[in-house]
Image: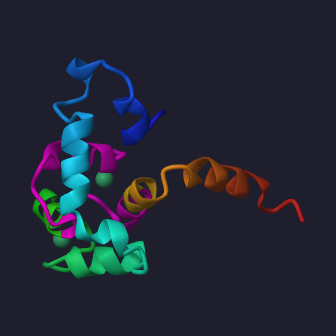
Amino acid sequence: MTFLISSFSKTDRDRSGGLNLKEFSAFLGKVKWWNMSRKTPEQWFKGSDKDSNEVLSKEELADLLGSKAHIDVFFKRADKNSSGDLDQKEVSAFINELIFPSTRAKNIRKTKSKGQN
Ligand SMILES: [Ca+2]
Ligand SMILES: [Ca+2]
């Protein structure tokens, strides 16, 4: 499963959900937290969970991202279990993928090797 950036290097615009490379760059320009990764995903999650029900709605995700642009696309990507809301794990994974797209494979390996000591 490839994520945002790698899929944009293809010219297949029709399957991109309306989000092309140009739009994605513009989106990143608006996303303030892109350059503010000193906050942990947990902190982002709690800061955006306005009603403190421990899941993020689409509106709360838009608040976290600082933009409603393509919010449907991002929400669907983040909502791994299609529950219609985002729990902290889903938000953390989503943020980590956005900020560190290449670390996911490493994380999977780390999880697999756990418990072998
Ligand atoms: Ca909430
Ligand atoms: Ca979910």
- Magenta span includes 84: yes
Residue 35: % across, % down:
35, 70
Residue 23, image x and y in percent? 18, 42
Quadrant of the rendering where the C terminus is positioned: bottom right
Above or below 67: residue 47: below
Q: Is residue 76 above or below residue 115?
A: above
In reply to whether residue 79 is colored magenta, the answer given is yes
Q: Which residues are magenta?
A: 64-93
- State which quadrant residue 107 falls in: bottom right
Q: Quadrant of residue 45?
A: bottom left
Instruction: Examine the rendered structure and indicate whether residue 57 appears above or below residue 84.
Output: below
Can the viewer see residue 19? Answer: yes
Along the horizontal axis of the image, is 117 left or right of 99? Answer: right
At 15% from the left edge and 50% from the top edge, which residue is drawn? 71
Q: Residue 105's spot in the image, x, y percent?
A: 62, 47
- Identity of the residue drawn at 25% across and 28% down: 16
Give me the residue at 48% from left, 50% from top. Answer: 101
Residue 116: which quarter of the image?
bottom right
